[in-house]
Amino acid sequence: MKDLGNLMKQAKEMQSKMAEMQASMESHELTGVSGAGMVEVTLNGKGDMRGLKIDPSIIDPEDPEIMEDLIKAAHADARAKVEAYSQEKMQEMTGGLQLPPGMQMPF
């Protein structure tokens, strides 16, 4: 029974750490760029868009596809940064504990 109590305590601590990490993820912002900085997309750690900046010089009403591609590229860059940040925070929280392939936290 002592082991069960210890296991429950560890689970409660992990739950508390997870809540703290989720709050941190929501407030942390990462910016992706494309077009040599002409387009910037800012996402929070949960992937919600918080900002978009477009250099007016790339706005061409005759060719909107260029701007669309730059926005998508900046968003992909920001998402990659969010994923890397998320993985880093998860490793800090789990102490480097490797999860089985395909298993994502939070469950």
Image (cartoon, helix red, strand yellow):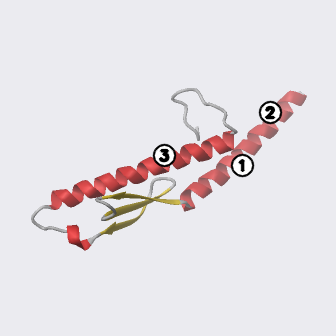
Determine the image quadrant of residue 69. bottom left
Q: Earlier in the sequence, mark 1 or mark 3?
A: 1
Q: Quadrant of the C terminus?
A: top right
Question: Mark 1 and mark 2: span between their CA atoms?
Answer: 14 Å
The amino acid at mark 3 is Glu
What SS does tag 2 mark?
helix
Pointer 3 residue: 83
Q: Residue at x 51, y 29 (%)?
A: 102
Q: Residue at x 29, y 53 (%)?
A: 72
The amino acid at mark 1 is Ser
Which label was assigned to residue 88?
A: none
Q: Earlier in the sequence, mark 1 or mark 2?
A: 2
Pointer 2 residue: 7
Q: Residue 44 at x, y = what percent? A: 49, 58
**Along the viewing direction, whichever of 70 and 28 lies nearer the viewer:** 70
Q: Residue 88 at x, y = what percent? A: 58, 45
What SS does tag 1 mark?
helix
Is 4 placed above or below 21 here?
above
Q: Residue at x 60, y 52 (%)?
A: 22
Q: Residue 12 at x, y = what percent? A: 76, 43
Judged from this view, the residue extending furthest toward the bottom is 56
Question: Mark 2 and mark 3: span between their CA atoms?
Answer: 30 Å
**Along the viewing direction, whichever of 20 and 86 lies nearer the viewer:** 86
Q: Earlier in the sequence, mark 2 or mark 3?
A: 2
Please indicate whether residue 90 sits to the left or right of residue 51 in the image: right
Pointer 1 residue: 16
The amino acid at mark 2 is Leu
Determine the image quadrant of residue 74. bottom left
Q: Residue 86 at x, y = what percent? A: 55, 47
